[in-house]
Image: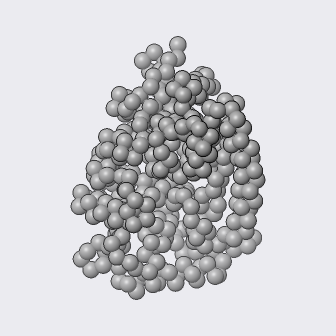
Amino acid sequence: MLRVTVLGSLAAVEPSAWDALAGDHPFLRHGFLHGVEATHCLEPQGWYSQHLAVYDGDTLCGALPLYIRDNSYGEFVFDWSWAEAYERGGARYYPKLVSAIPFSPVTGPRLLVAPGRQDRAAITNLLLETALAAVEDNQLSSWHCLFPEEDELPAHDEAGLARRLGCQYHWFNHDYRDFDHFLADLNSKKRKQIKRERRIVAEHDVAIEVLTGAEITAEHWSVFHRFYCSTFERKWGEPRLTEAFFQSLEQRLPGSAVLIMARAGTRYVAGAFGLKSGSVLYGRHWGCNAQFDNLHFELCYYQTIAYCIEHGLAKLDAGAQGEHKLARGFIPVNTWSTHWIREPGFRRAVGDFLKRERQAMEQHVHTLSAHVAFKAE
């Protein structure tokens, strides 16, 4: 008999039991999700854990990452205009329910089911039904599932959620031998541009260090966190991730962290942070305390591409936004979110908007695809 439990903290779940559902996706693993919770990244930013866990007897067999939100920061699927319109109509948009990876616009499974379960559909439906019931029972405005995998969308459709199409830019490894082999796939103009950008960085006499896992010391994390905070404060306001989060990463996600640091003389001046699975490098955050032309491109794109090639990773997911990535060997890919609004009239209005927006986004992606850096076939 399947039963659902609401988890106010992932401390209530054995890490190995949760990770059996999450696989090797670093952002879904217990170490990340409990890590942001335990190192005080969530509640100050308005994320309150309400994860759903499905048990078969005493065995965890399904789960849905779920949070109550009192704002929309750190989600990367923008619904601020919905909130404004909802509240102009006299209702409260917040709190709402969100299934997402906090502060991380990375696609991955959201309806987690233990491998080999014959009742996968039943577990999936139970998770969907429970999330929707939570919106109704608690008089919340809505439930939003952000960056689910595409093969989960039919189940969301059947449950009545509306799809929203987005776009990111990812780099794919076509069995490249080295960085020059990758460059050879690009058209002449873009190839020369990248070589010029890398040459300018080399002329700055900046040393690059690529560190992974246990190679990253407490001092490295401390320096990088200062860069991250400084850059975040200049651009977006209050930083999301605490130093304690970074310092605990190797313990929580052994071998997953990749830190690329730039040093001018004896001092570090910039850094880029990512996490890796067995096949994907997820570039996440950048920070600096000095300005060097093209250093951001070098650390966040060219060094990470080189890392993927050297280590046989299939893809680089460098995060949200950034059409400038097209000129550097990335291609546009679809991303998805799904949405359910409790108030029927507003739900219909959002559904109509999303249909029109999707047509425009499909045309946008088609147009972008004509401007990739690769040679014309």
Q: Residue at x 45, y 31 (%)?
A: 51
The picture places residue 370, in percent across and down from the top left corner, at 73, 68
Q: Is residue 97 left or right of residue 368?
A: left
Q: The C terminus appears in which quarter of the rendering?
A: bottom right
Q: Is residue 218 left or right of residue 161?
A: left
Of 108 and 290, nearer the camera is: 290
Q: Which residue is drawn at 41% across and 37% down?
A: 48
Of 376 and 65, nearer the camera is: 65
Q: How many labels does the image show?
A: 0
Task: Quadrant for residue 315, please give it.
Answer: bottom right
Residue farthest top in this picture? 1
Task: Quadrant for residue 111, please give it.
Answer: top right
Q: Is residue 290 left or right of residue 279?
A: left
Q: Could you tell me if residue 134 is visible in this image?
A: no
The picture places residue 158, in percent across and down from the top left corner, at 70, 30
Residue farthest bottom in this picture? 203
